[in-house]
Image (cartoon, helix red, strand yellow):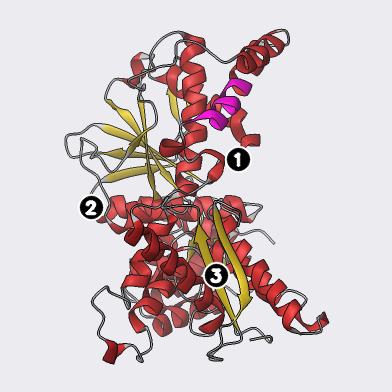
Amino acid sequence: MRTDENAIRTLQEALDAAFSEREWLRILELFAPTGIADSLHLRTSTGMERTRLQRVLDKMQALSSGLPPVLHLLDHTIARTGQRGRLPNIYLLGETGSALLRANGYPDAHPCELGNDHAMAHALCMLDVHLSAQKHDLDVHTDRVISYRDILTLRPDHQVILKDGTKLILEVEQLARRELVQRISGSLRHKQTFFESPESIGYHTDIRMILNVSPGHIFARTCNLWRSVIDSMREELDKRLNFRLLAMPLVDFLLDPEWEIDASQRWWDLTKIPMEKKETESRAENKIRAQVTKNSKEDLVLLSALYQALQEDPDATLTDHIDLYFLEVMLKIYEASHPDDLKSRLLWKPPHYSLSLLKDYFDLHPELVKRLRASMHQNISKWSWNSRTILHRMQRVIDTFLAYYGWKSNTFLSVRAVYGDDSGSEPFRVSVSSVGFLWGGYEESRRKLAALEWVLIALFRYADELGLGRPKFW
């Protein structure tokens, strides 16, 4: 059934009679930018508490009975980076809802037709950025086309009018995988063409890219891939780009939004040319380039980007996805309850501060929690538990944790599930050791390894408190 103008007019009259402050329109206006919103967006934007909001939604649904939906409640939730606790419900704009918006000054409103979770997560993040700009009293145009050179178009996620009147382009991106290199290359080429056109006058030459990925090694890995494509494109064009591409994790941006004209050092400049450039390429790289050149120039650019992504400096881009600094995080968590000057009379107390920080850390890394739960509980009922199978399952959980940071237990960093000591307090423990003092001096190395050991045994000892679920074998 399709809505018609008379039905929409009648429904609007009924809604206005039911809601003297037009709360129904305040709710629907939230869907105008992207066609999707979650319950947290709704509560924050309307100022309604949970119960009041649900009553308004139920009343809107009842008054529109017999018409296509005003809003669709998604039958599942979608985890997004940085979300804590219970995930909010997600709503999609329906046919009647979009018709009501069109009748109230939003001519471009249309039902949400996003077909998968990836696209919906992207749209929800776009809404986060849109609302942040509005909260800072900035005009923002979301998902709006820019026409240039008569026949070309650019459709950035956001165009924000800064305080001095300059237009700033913001893009929201998610995890960059290597199969997306061609799309990344195409996006960058379109922007290069736009900033060569007269229509770019009035636009800030910084493009700010907000990445919906976890801060740390995943953010660095994603930036690395974008940087590699940029370097290859610059080499092919044989000139500098007409814009800068700056990146920041979404979590960091939302915690402290930055809308100043001049970007701070918090942003990673992905278009910055290194101070020192290698003058010669390795024979292996030359061989790859020679082979690809025989096929197409485009392939050369794309494969060169992929190759460079594997060759970057480990300290700058965490080659092979290894997080070189994760032990610093483990130490920070550990030292909250285990300072160097801890008095012996306090040793018996539970490590509340460390557990609290570890729980907060897990809330920031839902994907890590998901993997740990799977490795800890998958096919648990099919196993016959004895000392050997328990150690095997513990090692599986430990390996899952290390793999999240790009590490694995080896002679460099040995992390093993082993039998407990003679005290009998616990039948199993985690043993961590490394070759030499590779994590600083003797005392610093000792503390970092002790921190990792404590965090790993805490996965089992405090599984319930950490939201992992206590395993049957512990």
Give x and y (percent) for residue 289: 64, 13
Q: Quadrant of residue 17?
A: bottom left
Q: Which mark is residue 306?
A: none
Does residue 70 appear in this view?
no
Comparing 425 with 57, the one in front is 425
Left or right placement of residue 166 versus residue 105 in this view:
left
Residue at image x 45%, y 69%?
363
Residue, disc 1: 177
Residue 172 image offset from top left, x and y in percent: 45, 44
Disc number placed over residue 431 in the picture, else none: 3
Q: Classify residue 61 by image quadrant.
A: bottom right
| Residue 297 against residue 26 in the figure, above or below | above
Which class describes the residues within 10 Å of circle 3: few (<14), some (14-19), or many (20+)? some
Local SS, label 3? strand
Q: Position of residue 474 (x, y in %)?
A: 63, 86
Instruction: Locate residue 170: give its quadrant.
Output: top left
* Marks 2, 1: nearer the viewer: 1
**Residue 99 among magenta residues:** no
Q: Quadrant of the N terminus?
A: bottom right
Residue 160 percent across, percent down from the top left:
31, 40
Q: Earlier in the sequence, mark 2 or mark 3?
A: 2
Q: Earlier in the sequence, mark 3 or mark 1?
A: 1
Q: To which residue does mark 2 refer?
A: 136
> What amino acid type is highlighted by mark number 3?
Ser
Report the front residue among 446 and 370.
446
- For the residues marked 2 and 1, what is the alpha-carbon distance in whole angstroms? 33 Å
How far apart marks 2 and 3 lie (CA) works out to 50 Å
Residue 114 seen anywhere in this rendered image of the structure: yes
- Look at label 1 and name its amino acid: Arg
Q: Label 2 crowding class (10 Å Cα cut-off): few <14, some 14-19, many 20+?
A: few
Would residue 392 be found to the left or right of residue 108 on screen? right
Residue type pointed to by label 2: His
